[in-house]
Amino acid sequence: MTNIIYMDNNATTRVAPEVVDVMMPYFSEQYGNPSSMHNFGGKVMSAVSEARDKIAALLGADADEIVFTSCGTESDSTALLSALKSNPDKRHIVTTRVEHPAIKNLAENLRSLTGHKYRVTQLSVASDGTLDLDEYEKALDDETAIVSIMWANNETGVIFPIEKMCKMAKDRDILFHTDAVQAVGKIPINLKEIPIDFLSLSGHKLHAPKGIGVLYVRRGTPFAPFMIGGHQEHGRRGGTENVASIVGLGKACELAAAHMAEENDQVRKLRDKLEKNLLESVPNAILNGHKNDRLPNTSNISFEYVEGESILLHMDAFGICASSGSACTSGSLEPSHVLRAMGVPFTAAHGSIRFSLSIYNTEEEVDFVIEKIPAIIENLRAMSPFWQDREK
Amino acid sequence: MWEYTDKVKEHFMNPLNVGEIENAEGTGDVGSLACGDALKLTLKIVDDIIVDAQFKTFGCASAIASSSALTEMVKGLPVDEAAKITNEDIAQFLGGLPKEKMHCSVMGREALEAAIANYKGVPLRVAEGDVVCECFGVTDLEVKRAIQESNLHTVEEVTNFTKAGGGCGKCHDRLQELIDEVQKDSTAKIIPMKGPKRMTTLQKIKMIEEVLEREIRPVLKKDGGDIELVDVDGDYVLVSLRGACGSCAKSQTTLKEYVEKKLREQVIDTLIVEEDK
Ligand SMILES: Cc1ncc(COP(=O)(O)O)c(C=O)c1O
Ligand code: FES
């Protein structure tokens, strides 16, 4: 098999070897149930508590504000539905057009499946993927139960001004949720300074396993559980804890907290090199998303007049893994809702490729990608009926 | 990730006949950038024989592979023979396409049709219909034809084959009406539009299995019965009835009135269903 060059870290990440190491004992050695009365289970409970502390530390939160869930999607659903339950007379949700489906589809379903009992405002974005704070201000009203705005966008990496937006909501006593699945571990977050009510994160985006998530719930924020069952998580989320993954997530957060700054420097340098070279060496290549207000690891580039799936499969032949916002890869027939919301023309949206790097990428890998991509694009353009006609 | 056959991968990684024939006798231009795929087919035709075919395609792997396959299939064929190529033929040449990608083979067929119409100097029939799906600019004639040729029964299938309905979704009701209209007509007439379909036994078995699984088995199971396909020999379909059906006096009626009728509707109208005893 060819060597894998993995540049699809916004889709999922490699579980760090250090994380795997700390998880291993919790499968067949320390397999007790943390709720048990015996010491065997009690030890496991201590491990869960320790992990909770580490996660809280990364977020600037307190341990009792951390609720474990099964994934980012569950955290998102829990937050939104909880806010609606605790505000039965408020029926307005403010969110954006570029949310992950975990929020976007949920909000749209809440609108359509309840016979428009809920009103949903989806804020638009500018062509560089940024939000308009005036539009946001106007959207907030006395009916608004919750604002849900992602911290960083998974497709473009664009970072939203969460601190400002949160304060604007809190000034009006509106609950504020942020889907920080792409932000946690990549950029500093301090919940001591920002009065966010709910924050979602997902383990597999920061080198912990898939299938573990966290919902941060600020102390004092009204809360209604989504998974109802046992008394785990103080009754906020029923279900026996996914102990090994929780321990792994704790380790991943510890690693992120310790190395965030230097890792960011390293990843950003590689990303910038990749981006600069591709934009220079491939004609009609366009960067999607704000150049600066962006995660350090993400670069979304459109190669005009070619189709994303074709590019990806040619890259795949070299072992290079990335994603595309093209229709053919989105599983629907239309290109990514994020690029469409930004008004990226079809000529470019279908040919968008998202590179998302991690600390495991090397300069050699970046050089290899820089070497291979231009020929792939050129080759596909030679085959494209639009390429030679583009002047017309 | 899509599951592509080796043949699709081969035609995608190393497509044949890429290019554009100058002063081509027939040119077919279909699709658009907005839709995410487009194909320009050029044919060199001498004495009503296609002596060369080249393509340029913008699209995903299956669009490129379908184009490459199409050019290989038509080269050397008399124009009238080539005109009989269906999208299913293209898909079959490639060892099959994922169902969500069938529209790529339809695009190939459409380009061929357009190129032949261009050669003959006649207008394109399907383009004349009324647009039913604005998102993808698909006409009612195109939709009806796909429903007929590929025996489509759901809006989702129509979307897979024609893209119609794959955007905002506001045309779904209209698509369902077209399905109902065509499927009603075809059961009344029974005879498919283009005469008996050419089909290999293997394809036939596959289709029969599918219809049994999807439509017939669930109905029999409700009455505590079941059905197994034993053999297919030409048009003879040998089945065995199980459970409650096997002992039921009405089993012959079930076979002829229901199973045979269903299979005729959905596979080929010449099938004869017999019980294996
Ligand atoms: C922004 C964002 N939110 C939510 C999710 C969903 O997370 P999970 O896969 O853990 O449910 C993802 C992951 O794809 C994401 O990128
Ligand atoms: S009109 Fe058909 S999907 Fe929009």
Image (cartoon, coloured by chain):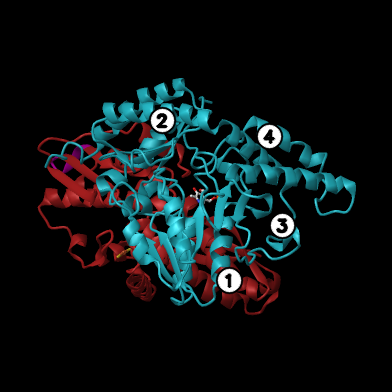
Chain colours: A cyan, B red
In this rendering, the label closer to the viewer, 1 or 4: 1
- Dot placed on the residue nearer the N-terminal end, 1 or 3: 1
- Dot placed on the residue nearer the N-terminal end, 4 or 3: 4
Q: Is mark 3 within 8 Å of ligand 1?
A: no
Relative to A19, does residue B216 appear above or below in the rendering? below
- Dot placed on the residue nearer the N-terminal end, 2 or 1: 1
Residue B166 can be seen in this image: no
Q: CA distance from mark 4 to mark 3?
A: 24 Å
What's the amino acid at mark 1? Answer: Ser
Residue B129 placed where, x, y %? 20, 66
Q: Quadrant of the C terminus of chain B?
A: bottom right
**Range of magenta residues:** B45-53
The dominant secondary structure in magenta is strand
Taking depth in this image into account, of B93 and A6 the one nearest to the observer is A6
In this rendering, the label closer to the viewer, 3 or 2: 3
What's the amino acid at mark 3? Answer: Glu
Residue A271, label in figure: 2
Q: Are marks 2 and 4 in contact (CB under 8 Å)?
A: no
Q: Are marks 4 and 3 in contact (CB under 8 Å)?
A: no
Q: CA distance from mark 1 to mark 3?
A: 19 Å
Residue bearing mark 4: A20
Residue B4 placed where, x, y %? 45, 42
Residue bearing mark 1: A86
Residue A233, label in figure: 3
Q: Chain of mark 3?
A: A
Q: Chain of mark 4?
A: A
Residue B235 can be seen in this image: yes
- Dot placed on the residue nearer the N-terminal end, 2 or 4: 4
